[in-house]
Amino acid sequence: MTITTEQQTFALSRQELEQFERDGFLGPVKIYEVEEMETRWKTIQRELRDRSHAIYPEGSGKASSISNYDRHLDIDLLSEHIMKREIVDRVASILGPDLLCWRSEFFPKFQGDEGTDWHQAANFAHASGSPQIVWPSQDGLPAFGGTITVWTAFTHSTRENGCLQLMPGTHKHMNYDESKGMSYDADAFNAREKDGVKRGFFGYDYRQLQKDPDWKPDESQAFPLVMKPGECVIFWSTLMHASLPHTGAKKDYRMGYAARFVPTQVQVYPGTEKVDEYGGGITLDNYGTVLVSGVDEFGHNRVAKESRRGFPFVPHRQG
């Protein structure tokens, strides 16, 4: 009997779960063959230019990056991507069967672009100081938080074009206080070196959030994660991660696509109707989370049943 992709499971093995618990990440994991990813990316590139169904208005300058959040809500190939069993089954192994995708983002890097600061994110309040996700408290204590990020290489990701860097095992202790917020400086792009490496955080300096202003990340723990098109890395957002600067050829740009997942009991954008960061803002009028797996018994969040072009978001049934 032939097993279809829908019948096949990609749940993590006990060994993989133990590794993820220890290291805070798993990967690279192949989601697509290289040729398939290259073909998909060519189509997605064309469709990105059409914003007629995008849920956010187009921004300007560097702030335009937030207007390209959540294109899985209007581009079918991205809708399909966040629902892909090869991704959802693995994330559900970690977070449980009832699962939301609450955000997706593109991460391009072009010749001369700076690397990204070392950072961790528990509630994504780092830019404004206002939490974007809130986990329920446990035993009366504040929840540690975090999201599972699935960062997929849409192009080759190499040392030269600015691949990710990870520090294994750093996901259980926060070195930053996101409630502080950071000051945005449009002139900070490609303008700072930190310990000899050109780094920044999209117009911010992530060092402003350090709990100990004299602390420095121990880069001896870090390694560069080289990936082929179609491979992904799955990691806790609380894992210390960064990226290298793009020092390679102009034609060799890097494009990553991050989909972020939380259990259905997590509140997304609680008490807010707008997201302000990176020198701009977006209204959440047309926003919705996507139930990718299981059921939502909590009803905390607005859930999109289909994409803006009619792609049906039918959750996988776990268990």
Image (tube, rainbow, N blue to C red):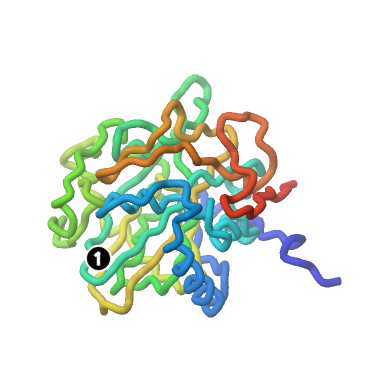
Tally the marks: 1
Q: Residue at x 49, y 19 (%)?
A: 140
Residue 191 lies left or right of residue 244; in this view the side is: left
Residue drawn at point x = 36 percent, y = 51 percent: 58
Q: Which residue is mark 1?
A: 245
Instruction: Give the residue type at disc 1.
Output: Pro
Query: Is residue 134 or residue 277 the one in the foreground?
Result: 277
Vertically, is 120 above or below 34? Answer: above
Compare residues 245 and 304 and report the one nearer the observer: 304
Q: Quadrant of residue 164?
A: bottom left
Residue 154 drawn at (x, y percent)? 45, 68
| Front residue (pair 290, 148) | 290
**Residue 49 left/right relative to 32:** left
- Residue 31 screen position, x and y as percent: 57, 67
Q: Is residue 107 left or right of residue 308?
A: left
Check the image and report above or below for 42 versus 183.
below
Residue sticking out furthest to the top: 140
Residue 2 is situated, as x and y percent measured from the top left of the image, at 82, 72
In the image, taking residue 268 as reference, residue 165 lies left or right, namely left
